[in-house]
Image (spheres, grey):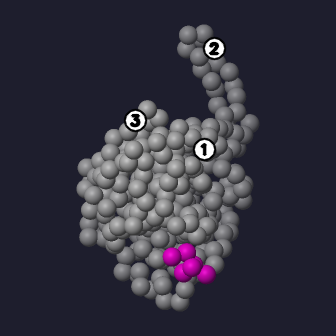
Amino acid sequence: MSTLLPLATQAGSTACRPVASTRWRYEAETCVARDTEIAVEWPVNIRYGSVPYAVMMATPLDLEDFVTGFSLTEGIIADASEIRAIRISDEPEAISVDVELAPGRFRQHLGRQRRLTGRTSCGVCGVEDASQLPRAERRSATRTPVAAEAVARAVGDLRAHQPLYARTRAVHGAAWCDREGRILMAREDVGRHNALDKLIGAVLRAGEAATGGFVVVTSRASYEMVEKTAMLGAAALVSVSAPTSLAVSRARAAGLMLVSVAREDGCEVFSGELTR
C-alpha cells in the first residue's frame, strides 16, 4: 500500500506519487483496488535572509523558478539579478527555500509582509488592507501585437506541454509563447498562481524579452493573474476559462491584452485587439 505522507525529501523529489484507491464502475457494479497517481501538494516555506515571509502550498517542482517569479510579483525584486542565491532544503514537515537578495532589497519591502499561509486557491493571503493589493506599476506601450492564429496555436498545443496534468488531472498550467504562438516553456502546479509565478520566474531567469511574447493559463483570469502578467511585461494574458470583472478593468488600465474562454476554434477578447 502506498504512503500518503512520505518524508519531505521524497516530496521534494517528485511532483506526483501513487496512492491507494478503489475504482468504482457504477453500471458494471464492480470495484477494483489500484494505485492512482496524484499531484503532490506540500508546504513551501519562503524566507528572505532567514526572515520568514510566506508558507505557500505548492507542487515541489521548479522551485527556483517559483521563488523568482513570486519575488517579482510580490514586489520584492524588480529583476532576477537582484537574487544572489537560492537554497532549497528539506525539513520534517515542509520544504524551505532561503533567498539571498541584493543588500537592502528586502528591507524596502518590510512594510508589507504576508502574515498567513498562502493557500493554493488564494492569491492575496496575508494582505491586511485593500490598498496593499498587487498592482502593476507601469503601462507598457512596446508590447508585441498578438494574432488570432497565434492564440489558436498556443491553446491547441497546451496539453502537450502538461505532462503532470496528463498523469494526475489535478494541476494548472502556465505557458510562455512567442508571437507566433509557439510554446517556449511551460510550468505546472496545484495552484494556478503558483504555476504562473513559476513561469514568470523561468522567463526572468532565461533572460527572455517579456514584451515579445504572451502567457497562456489553464485557469480563469482573475485580477491577480492579470497583475502578475502585467508586472512581467508580457503582451497578453490568454486564459482557457472566463475572466472576472476586476481582471478586465485591471487589464485595460495596464494596457494588457486579455483573451479568455480561449479554444482552438475561437476566443473572447476583453482588453486590447487581436490582429488577423
| Mark 3 vs mark 2, CA separation in Å | 41 Å
Q: Which comes before the other along the chain, label 3 or label 2?
A: 2
| Mark 1 vs mark 3, CA separation in Å | 21 Å
For badge 2, the amino acid type reads Thr
Q: Secondary structure at mark 3?
A: strand
Quadrant containing the N terminus is top right
Give coordinates of residue 46: x percent, y percent.
54, 70
The quarter holding residue 129 reads bottom left
Quadrant containing the C terminus is top left
Could you say which is closer to the camera, residue 158 or residue 106? 158
Label 1 crowd bin: few (<14), some (14–19), many (20+), radius 10 Å: some
For badge 1, the amino acid type reads Gln
Residue picked out by circle 3: 266
Q: Is residue 98 visible?
A: yes
Give coordinates of residue 183: x percent, y percent.
57, 50
| Left or right, 108 with reference to 23 | left
Q: Residue furthest top?
A: 28
Residue picked out by circle 1: 162
Label 2 crowd bin: few (<14), some (14–19), many (20+), radius 10 Å: few
Could you say which is closer to the camera, residue 265 or residue 42? 265
Numbered range of the magenta stretch: 79-84
**Mark 3 near mark 2, Cβ–Cβ under 8 Å?**
no
> Which residue corresponds to the image point at 69% horizontal and 44% vertical from the top-left?
17
> Which residue corresponds to the image point at 55% horizontal and 42% vertical from the top-left?
158
Residue picked out by circle 2: 30
Tell which tag, 3 or 2, sits nearer the viewer.
3
